[in-house]
Amino acid sequence: MIYDILKPLVSISLRAYFKRIDVRGQEHLDYKHLLLVSNHPSAMFDPLLMAVTSKKPLHFIAGIEWFGEGLKKWLFTKHFNMIPVYRPWLKTGKNQDNKDMFRECYLSLERGDSVIIYPEAESITVSWIRELKTGAARIKLGADQHLKEQGIDEEVKIVPVGLNYSNPHRFQSGLLINIGEPIDFNDIDKDGEPKEVARKMTERIKQSMEDQVLHIEQAEHNPLIKAAMKLLTDTIMSEIGLNRRDHGQAFIVRKEIIRSMEITKRENPEAVSGLEDRLIKYVDQFEALGFRRFNPFETETSTRLLLIVGAIIGAPFFALSMVVNGLPFLIARAAFMKLLLSKVTQEHKQGQINPAFAGSLAFSTGLAIFVFWDSSSFQACLCPGGSHGR
């Protein structure tokens, strides 16, 4: 199966593209009948990252407009585990329903495979959770009934996923994947009016997804809170004795900063009046000096010595790597900058590509060029003299 063949290669490539990938709560992916609900800040990275994080086969619900016909549709459905969904609000001109989508989800969940849905319904690069469609709740309700009809006395678990990128469109950025506990719907009466039941379940899903990301209730507060997180996170972690390299703990600290800032903004707005412009200006000036952390000199002596020794020992290997990998990297960078970047700078225009694909396109360009480069180099090493006759 192409999915299984490509999975190791994609995993290695993602580890190379991102500076660091941390996963919290991976044990929650082991449930048998599992429906994942995730935010969707990066169009292609999001499903790729979840595919390599999940040990079990993962099935992806995706807009039917991406599938096309013939070979492309066959590859997507049979080899990439993609389940097409019709999104009527896009007004594609096709009069379709989603009976086949629900049926495929039920069968996948019955087999014990996992299904992932992005209930925000479209990819936009923001850190907070947007309004959700009710599809996830409806899939669970229908799948639970389907399992019961098949004599399976189990329910589908809905598990929330939060993809927290430092910047999904920047090479060597960081990522924290938060995987929460299954959502509890026991207090919701499933025998009520179906639309109302789905609405209540969707509200619960949204709350659980918000817990997994750096969700900010009011978007207009985002610049101020982001600046506060940059300024305070390392300092707070240092003062309470946390390892600043622990991204999971850093996430918890940032969530508390967001909560505190939103409470202050709501209950005592004059306390932050005029602070936003000064704080953002300060952070911008600090970062302009080349720093990325606000306590850059708080490093233990032993750590500095290890870094120095590592740099000396690793220098020859670094130089060799630069020679071997530098050229394909520059080729990939030039190809993306010259041919693709201009197409993702605007949205909703003919010939333009959704900006949520920017990082994914950079990754795909680099992956294709490096695979070609490395395979050609390997072949050249095996046959250094060519195939000349004697």
Image (spheres, rainbow, N blue to C red):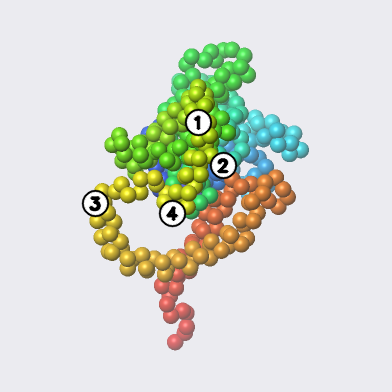
- Please name the residue that numbered disc 3 is placed on: 301
Identify the residue under disc 2. 125
Q: Residue at x 61, y 17 (%)?
A: 196
User: Which residue sits at x=34%, y=37%?
Assistant: 237
Query: How packed is label 2: few (under 14 Cα within 10 Å), some, or many (20 or more)?
Result: some
Q: Sequence order check: which comes first, mark 3 or mark 2? A: 2
Give the alpha-carbon distance from disc 1 to disc 3, as whole Å.
38 Å
Q: Earlier in the sequence, mark 1 or mark 3?
A: 1
Coordinates of residue 71 in the picture (x, y in percent)? 64, 50
Residue 240 lies, with reference to residue 203, above or below; the image says below
Q: Nearer the viewer, mark 2 or mark 4?
A: 4
The earlier-in-sequence mark between 2 and 1 is: 2
**Residue bearing mark 1:** 272
**Which residue is at 28% across, 36% downward?**
241
Q: Would you name the residue on which mark 4 appears? A: 290
- Place residue 62 in its image quadrant: top right
| Percent position of residue 358, x then y | 58, 50
Question: Which residue shows up at 29% across the image and 56% down it?
Answer: 307
Amino acid marked by disc 1: Val
Left or right position of 242 against 362: left
Q: Amino acid at mark 3?
A: Thr
Q: Amino acid at mark 2?
A: Thr
